[in-house]
Image: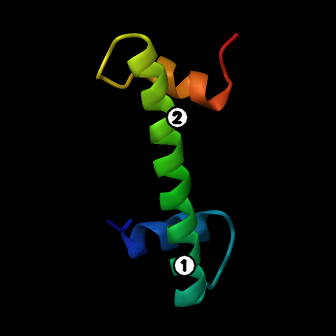
Amino acid sequence: MSLPVATIERVIKSAGVPRVAGSATNMIIAQAESYITDLAKKSYAYAKHAGRNTLKDTDVKAALGLVD
């Protein structure tokens, strides 16, 4: 699985970075995928604890520690 390079480059440029090397883009992609995978696993644990298989925004908020 890999995030689209062009999309990530647009995100990087929207952060004000005028030029980015391909190797830097690839490192950002790898880290983003790792972060997303970890967040999804943590979020799914909350869904399973609630007796669901469907991931909801409340599960993601809980995994991010954004629950009141």
Viewer-proximal residue among 24 and 38:
38
How would you rate the neighbour count of disc 2 (Cα within 10 Å): few for under 14, some for 14-19, many for 20 or more? some
Q: Position of residue 8 (x, y in %)?
A: 48, 68
Residue type at mark 1?
Answer: Thr
On residue 42, the disc is: 2
Which of label 2 and label 1 is nearer to you?
2
Using the numbered discs, state the Cα–Cα distance from disc 2 to disc 1 in whole angstroms: 26 Å
Q: Left or right? Give the position of 17 relative to 42.
A: right
Q: Position of residue 16 (x, y in %)?
A: 69, 69
Viewer-proximal residue among 68 and 20:
68
The residue under the point 49% across, 49% down is: 36
The residue under the point 51% across, 69% down is: 30
> Quarter of the image containing the C terminus?
top right
Vertical side of 56 occupied by 23: above or below: below
Q: Position of residue 21 (x, y in %)?
A: 59, 89
On residue 25, the disc is: 1
The residue under the point 30% across, 23% down is: 54
Vertical side of 19 occupied by 7: above or below: above
Q: Secondary structure at mark 1?
A: helix
